[in-house]
Amino acid sequence: MSGGPTILHADLDAFYASVEQLLDPALRGRPIAVGGSAGGGVVLAASYEAKAFGVRGGMPGRQARQLCPRLTFVRGHFGEYQRLADDVMDILHSVTPAVERISIDEAFLDVSGSTHLFGSPAGIGARLRHQVRREVGLPISIGAARTKHLAKVASQVAKPDGLVVVDPEREREFLAPLPVGLMWGVGPVAERRLAERGIRTIGDLAGTPSAALERLLGHAAGAKLAALALNEDPRRIATSRRARSVGAQSALGRRRPTPELVHQTLGHLADRVGGRLRAHARAGRTVTVRVRFAGMAAVTRSLTLPAPVSATLTLTEVAEQLAWQALADHDGADISLLAISVSNLAAQQHVQLELTVPPGDPRSPGSPAGSARWALDHSMDAVRARFGRAAVTYLSTARAPGAPDAFRELAERDL
DNA sequence: TCTGGGGTCCTAGGACCC
DNA sequence: TCTGGGGTCCTAGGACCC
């Protein structure tokens, strides 16, 4: 069936940092880090010049500065990231409609139907790279191979600013010397467990029986890894996929969990989550709250309701109840993060679906108070659609903790 | 060195049903 | 009174991805 290397994986290099260097020529060729909110926080992205010093995304700013004293910190231009990445995706779409965007700066393409128009997959990859560089001004790496997994590994090998094509005849020899950490699904824990058995390269992995990997890493993870190591990857390009959950979180530093803090933070998060759900005519039955304590240990509490919900005030109330359950088990501990996630999603047809509470309860949509919630949410949604998010807020959620909205929106996935 | 924000999938035990 | 086997749903935790 599929003989040639018709899957492409395209990945913008050090995306946020490259955009900053594009916008400000004085930053080019220099080690820079893009920061989140004002002041310290973590490194969101590092330029290749900074990576040479060991600076990585997710690293605390203080640590990054120690590794690289000449590091320049810049505030992110989040709106520009979205615009430029969308421009790049438009270029990818110019060679095939079979584009699967997996994050803001990364996509798979199936070019099997495009070769008669645009030439070989290798030629298409080269053409796309040049076009992105010329029209958008950003470096992008591309891997081309017979499967998604091979294409993704190839693009990682191609970085920075390169193109690697894996000949289907030479897949095994291409993968064999590479470290297992490049495999999809091998993170720090799996890497350590494998290393304890002397398994360090993908070649080592291919020589390990599936049953042994399943014992080591669990049934599903072991079986998947064994198949991938033998280049068996059945995954197709999926141009659209429904989200299975919607969430929001806020890091809080180190705070005492007062009723005011918990109420305001969860109110803000519920407002974000509810607003996104309603904007896409969706709602969810399961509400999950995550509480992270000052020592980074975290617990979750969840509740599955009889019917899907999306009203901000309902989500806030359920979340508060769950949060206090979790906090009651860790009496007196300071907290460092609160999160809300809604799953078990369904289409939100009508107001009736907000029947999460017995009739007569003020929260029921059949009651005057329940209808009022819907009217309130929908009028606020309408105002925001015309004038922007900040135009109107619930009193209790007016103070927005944590990262700026523009940064949050970058990470959001389509519903 | 105590670290952002948004997601997916898997595991395991218990409740409950037939 | 004790016992089978299979299935679904819910909850909590955890690894992993970008």
Image (cartoon, coloured by chain):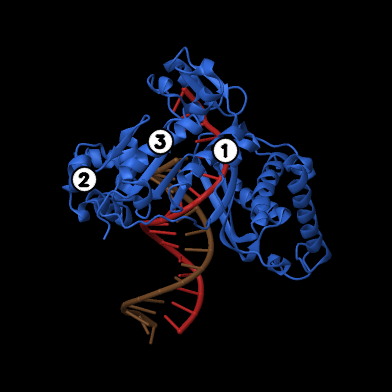
Chain colours: A blue, B red, C brown
Q: Residue at x 32, y 34 (%)?
A: A158
Q: Earlier in the sequence, mark 2 or mark 3?
A: 3
Q: Earlier in the sequence, mark 1 or mark 3?
A: 1
Which quarter shows the N terminus of chain A?
bottom left
In the structure shown, which secondary structural element does the residue marked by tag 1 occupy?
helix
In the structure shown, which secondary structural element does the residue marked by tag 3 occupy?
helix
Residue A156 position by quadrant: top left
Q: Which mark is residue A82?
A: 1
Q: Residue at x 67, y 49 (%)?
A: A270
Say which of marks 2 and 3 sits in front. 3
Q: Is residue A273 above or below residue A25?
A: below
Residue farthest toward the left in the current orientation of the protein = A207
Q: Which mark is residue A171?
A: 2
Q: Which mark is residue A129?
A: 3
How many numbered marks does the figure carry? 3
Q: Residue at x 52, y 24 (%)?
A: A22
Q: Is residue B4 above or below residue A327?
A: above
Cα separation between marks 1 and 3: 19 Å
Q: Earlier in the sequence, mark 2 or mark 1?
A: 1
Q: Is residue A190 left or right of residue A49?
A: left
Residue A92 position by quadrant: top left
How many C-alpha atoms fall within 10 Å of the one at disc 1: few (<14), some, or many (≥20)?
some
User: Mark 1 belongs to which amino acid?
Assistant: Gln
User: Mark 2 belongs to which amino acid?
Assistant: Glu
